[in-house]
Amino acid sequence: MRQGKKSFRHESLQDADSIQAILTAVSEGLAKGKVTFSDEDDKLVMRPEGLLHLKVTASQEENYHRINLRVSWQVEDERMKKKKSLKVSGK
């Protein structure tokens, strides 16, 4: 059975130093295998493992500039870790 979708979203205006501190915290969490996101309304704990997929995009349109960083990974289902025996019959 799949777990329900859990998500965390936060938007705010920050200066470059504050954003650098947030990115450093994410980097340190990735290195330790645990990243926690929280604010007054919500909390989400993620445990990155194995190979991580990284997607970086950047764009400039007149007065609007954007950098997107996406890190994703597949979490192995505990039930899938159990080895199932294979039976093959030629009858």
Image (tube, helix red, strand yellow):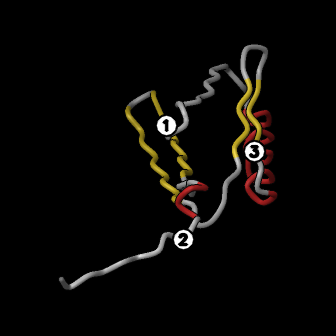
Residue at 39% x, 31% y: name it: 62
Q: Secondary structure at mark 2?
A: loop
Residue 80: x and y, percent? 52, 60
- Residue reaching furthest bottom? 90
Residue 82: x and y, percent? 58, 65
Quarter assignment of residue 11: top right
> Hey, what amino acid is under mark 1?
Arg
Q: Residues within 10 Å of mark 1 (few under 14, many from 20)?
A: few
Mark 1 vs 2, N-terminal side: 1
Which residue lies under the disc numbered 3?
A: 35
Mark 3 vs 2, N-terminal side: 3
Please give left or right for residue 88 compared with residue 80 in the image: left
Label 3–label 2 contact, CB within 8 A: no
Residue 39: x and y, percent? 77, 21
> Hey, what amino acid is under mark 2?
Lys
Classify 4 as above or below 58: above
